[in-house]
Amino acid sequence: MAMSPNFFNKREPQAPATRPVVPLPQAAGYGPSANAEALPAASPAQGGQATPAREGGSKLTVGPNIKLKGVEITDCDTLVVEGLVEATMDSRVMAIAEQGAFKGSAEIDIAEIRGQFDGDLTVRQKLVIYGTGKVSGKIRYGNLVIEEGGQLSGDIQFGALPIPRPASGEKPALAVAG
């Protein structure tokens, strides 16, 4: 076995190697698509950059041609649907790709729909429906963005969280004089 002449000897000081500076993505939002073109996340083989999941967060990706039926999805920060999911879930972020579909019930902070959603959808913060997206069912949302071509149908209400009403006999905290 040949050893380097510097193996036991003191090494010459070297200048620290410089690493290229990589710009961070814009912090306009969070989730699977901080920029509008990141879903589905491009793989390095396709020449794109995959958007990383929030550090320490849990991410479930249901890939193309995968069918996930009859489940309850819990403790998932980000769900990316590229196949078919029939489930009930409560999550932080849900992104449905163009070829993806979700049927069932979901309570989400942020939803980005490029494919299809059918069922009960409660989006606490922001619902984004892209031009290829189709959302139908009982829909509740905090903020809504629909790109030209996007479709939204069914029982639709602003306000993801129901406003509590006083029980009969109780006076409301604020009253309007008439």
Image (spheres, rainbow, N blue to C red):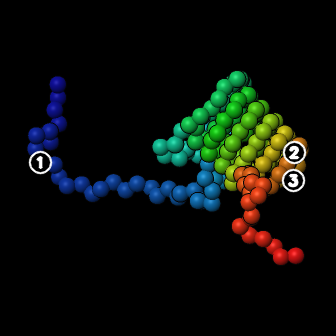
Q: Quadrant of the N terminus?
A: top left
Q: Residues within 10 Å of mark 2 (few under 14, many from 20)?
A: few
Q: Quadrant of residue 170?
A: bottom right
* Disc 3/disc 2 C-alpha distance (Å): 20 Å
Q: Secondary structure at mark 2?
A: strand
Q: Amino acid at mark 1?
A: Lys
Q: Who comes first in sequence, dot 3 or dot 2?
A: 3
Q: Mark 3 — residue?
A: 148
Q: Who comes first in sequence, dot 1 or dot 2?
A: 1
* Disc 1/disc 2 C-alpha distance (Å): 75 Å
* Disc 3/disc 1 C-alpha distance (Å): 67 Å
Q: Amino acid at mark 3?
A: Glu
Q: Mark 1 — residue?
A: 10
Q: Residue at x 53, y 47 (%)?
A: 54
Q: Residues within 10 Å of mark 3 (few under 14, many from 20)?
A: few
Q: Residue at x 71, y 67 (%)?
A: 173
Nearer to me, 175 or 41: 175
Q: Nearer the viewer, mark 3 or mark 1?
A: 3
Q: Nearer the viewer, mark 1 or mark 2?
A: 2
Nearer to me, 153 or 14: 153
On the rendered structure, is 35 left or right of 159?
A: left
Q: Residues within 10 Å of mark 1 (few under 14, many from 20)?
A: few
Q: Mark 2 — residue?
A: 155
Q: Residue at x 67, y 45 (%)?
A: 108
Do the residues under discs 1 and 2 have CB atoms within 8 angstroms? no
Image coordinates of residue 130 in percent, x first then y, are 80, 48
Q: Quadrant of residue 50?
A: top right
Q: Residue at x 78, y 39 (%)?
A: 120
